[in-house]
Image (spheres, rainbow, N blue to C red):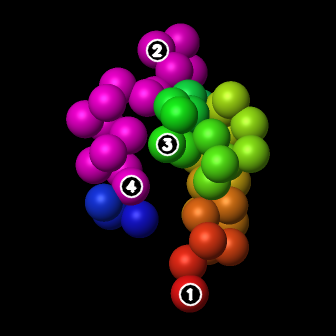
Amino acid sequence: MKKLWDYIKANNLQDPNDKRTILADDKLKPVFGADSVGMFKLAGLVGGHLS
């Protein structure tokens, strides 16, 4: 999760109007399944892609 947050911050993927919303770029859309996701749902969405 730390590396994911580093990626989000490095690529300015937080919504400027609501920092709790993460905007998906082309790499994150397959993981999120949406254009944006709330930070509280982030762990659940990513967890399904980890083994």
Q: Mark 4 points at which residue?
A: 4
Residue 37 position in % (x across, y down): 67, 39
Q: Mark 3 points at which residue?
A: 27
Q: Residue at x 28, y 49 (%)?
A: 6
Relative image position of residue 21 (x, y in whole percent): 59, 32
Q: Which amino acid does label 2 sit on?
A: Pro
Q: For this view, does 48 lie left or right of residue 17?
A: right
Q: Distance between the Cα atoms at labels 3 and 1?
A: 19 Å
Q: Single out the mark in the foreground, 4 or 1.
A: 1
Give the residue number, with chain letter if any, for mark 1. Answer: 51
Residue 2, given in percent of the width and then of the height, sits at 32, 62
Q: Mark 2 points at which residue?
A: 16
**Which is in the foreground here, disc 4 or disc 3?**
3
User: Magenta region: which residues?
Assistant: 4-18
Q: As shown in the figure, which amino acid type bears the numbered disc 3?
A: Lys
What's the distance in space between the residues labelled 1 and 2, CA to CA? Answer: 32 Å
Q: Is 48 on the left or on the right of 8, as rendered?
A: right
As helix, strand or loop, the secondary structure at mark 2 comes to loop
Say which quarter of the image contains residue 20: top right
